[in-house]
Amino acid sequence: MEKRRAAVTGIGVVSPLGNSADELYRNLAANRSGIRAMTRWHDYFGRDIAGAPVELDPAAVRKISRKVRRTMGNTALFAGIAAQEAVAQSGLEPEFFTSGRMGCIIGSTVGSPSSMTEACVAEHEGRRNDLSACHFFRLMSHSSSFNVADMFGINGPQLSTNSACASGLQALGAALELIQLGKVDAVLAGGADESTPLVASSFQLLYALAEEESPEPERLSRPFDAARTGLVCAEGAGVLVVEEMEHARKRGAQILFEIVGYATNCSGWHVSHSDELQIANCMRGALADAGIAPGEVDYVCAHATGTKVGDAAEAAACRAVFGSEVPVSSLKGHLGHTLGASGALELAAVYGMMRDGVVFPTRNLENVEDCAGILLPREIREQKVRICLKNSIAFGGVNASLVCRSVD
Amino acid sequence: MDHETIVKTVNSIFIERFELDESELTPEKTIMGDLQLDSLDLVDMIVGLQQKFGIMLRDNPEVRSVRTLGDVYALFEKLAKEHPEIEANIR
C-alpha cells in the first residue's frame, strides 16, 4: 500500500531570535545571536551566566483568550503563540479543526518548569491554598498539547511527546505516522520549552553548561568547536502544520516542504551519554524510511549543543553515515539550546535554507579537533538544499531524525 | 469595614484575575451567566477572596451559594461583622 505523504503547510516560531519564522530566519541569515548575559539570574548563580530568553509582546499574549491562557505556563504560551502563526500561514479553515480529522502533538521536557517551581515554593511555605485552580494544568506534562488543542477546538488525537530535547522532532515524527496511517488529515505538531535558573542548573550539575561569565556571552555557544565548554540554555517553541499531501493540494495550500522519512531510537544503556552507533542507526533508519541514500542528502541540521561528549558523538555518527561531503551545521551557536523546542524550531530555519538555497554555518566555530572528518561550513554557503536531515538527541539516550524534501 | 471598601476589594479580584472591566461589575450581575465565569474561575474567585480578605472560605457553605456579585458583597458584609479583624487583613 502506498504511504500517504505529509506536507508542511504552516510554520510558527517563538525564539530568542524573534517570534516569527521570518524574523528568526532573517536574524540567522545576519549571523545574529540570541544569547546574552542573564543578569536576572545573577542572584541564583552568583554571576551573569549566558542564556537565550524569549521576549514576548504582551499584546500577542493577550490575543490568547483568558480562558485558554489561564491554564498555560510559559511553555504552553510559547507553543500557543507559535501555533497561531503556523495555523494562519496554513490557511486551514476553523471548521476543519473540529472535524475530528485534525490532531495536536506538542511535546516539552516538562509541562512548565516555572509553574512547577511556583507550586513547590508555595507548598514549602505552607501556601498551597493560595495556588490557582488552574495551576496544575500549567505544569502537567501535556500542558502545551491540550492548551493548543483547546485554542483551536481540535478534537482529533492529542498526544504529548515529552522526551526532553527530542520532544519537538518526535512530535513531527508522530504526526507523519498518524497521517501515513490515515488516522488524521492534519496535525499541529512541534515542541516548546522554557528556560529557568532551575533548568540551567540541571545542566550545570552535569558539567554540561557553558557557565563561565564572559564579556561576550554570544560567543559561548560553540557547537563542534575545540574550545566548547557546554550548552547555553534557551527557550521557545516551534509548531508546524503537517498535512496530508492530497488534502493540502486539493484546497490549494502552499506546500512549504515535505516530510519524507523519520526514525527514532534510544541507546538502551545510558541516560546521558550520546551513543554514536545509535545516532548513526537512527539517521540510517530515517533515510531508509524515506527511501533516500546518504549521498542524496544536501545538508544535515545537527543537534550539537556545544557539549564535549555530545558533539563528538554526533560528529562521529555523521562521519560514519555521510563521510565528509555533506555540510553539517548546528544552529545552536546562534540560538542556544531551545531544549524540547529545538527540533521543530530549527526546522523553521531549515525551510528557509531549502527555499533560498543556502546553508547556515555553525556560529562561533573556529577550530575543529575531535569533530573532524565532517564538512563544517564556517560561512553561509550557497547551495541547493533539496534533501535535509534534522537530528535531535536527548537525555534518556533518545535519538530522533527527520528527513525533509523541498518542493520543486 | 464599610460597604464601599468591600465592593472595591471584591471587585479588584474580578478585575485582576478575570480581566473584567470595572464598568461591568454591578451587584445584579450573575457570576456564571453575565460575567461568564466557569467552574475553574469560581475556585479561583474563592482563592482570590481568601487572599484579599485573609480568611479561609473553602469550607464555608455560604460561599458556594453565591450567584450574583451582590451576593458576594452581602457575604462579606456578614463576615466583616463576624470577623472584625478582616479589615486589617485587606492587602
Image (cartoon, coloured by chain):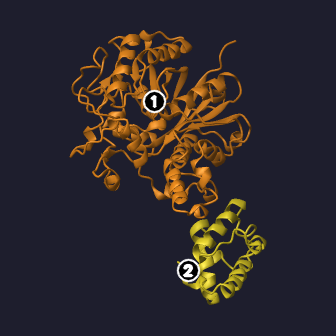
Chain colours: A orange, B yellow
Instruction: Tell me the kind of residue under disc 2.
Output: Asn
- Residue A12 shows in the view: no
SS at mark 1? Answer: helix
Q: Position of residue B35 (x, y in %)?
A: 70, 69
Q: Which residue is mark 2?
A: B89
Give residue A201's quadrant in the image: top left
Q: Which residue is mark 1?
A: A351
Instruction: Tell me the kind of residue under disc 1.
Output: Tyr
Checking the image for residue A226, the label placed there is none
Q: Position of residue A209 (x, y in %)?
A: 34, 38
Q: Position of residue A293 (x, y in %)?
A: 47, 9
Q: Are marks 1 and 2 in contact (CB under 8 Å)?
A: no
- Residue A401 shows in the view: yes
SS at mark 2? Answer: helix
Label 1 environment density (alpha carbons within 10 Å; few <14, some 14–19, many ≥20): many
Choose between A105 and A264: the one closer to the eye. Answer: A264
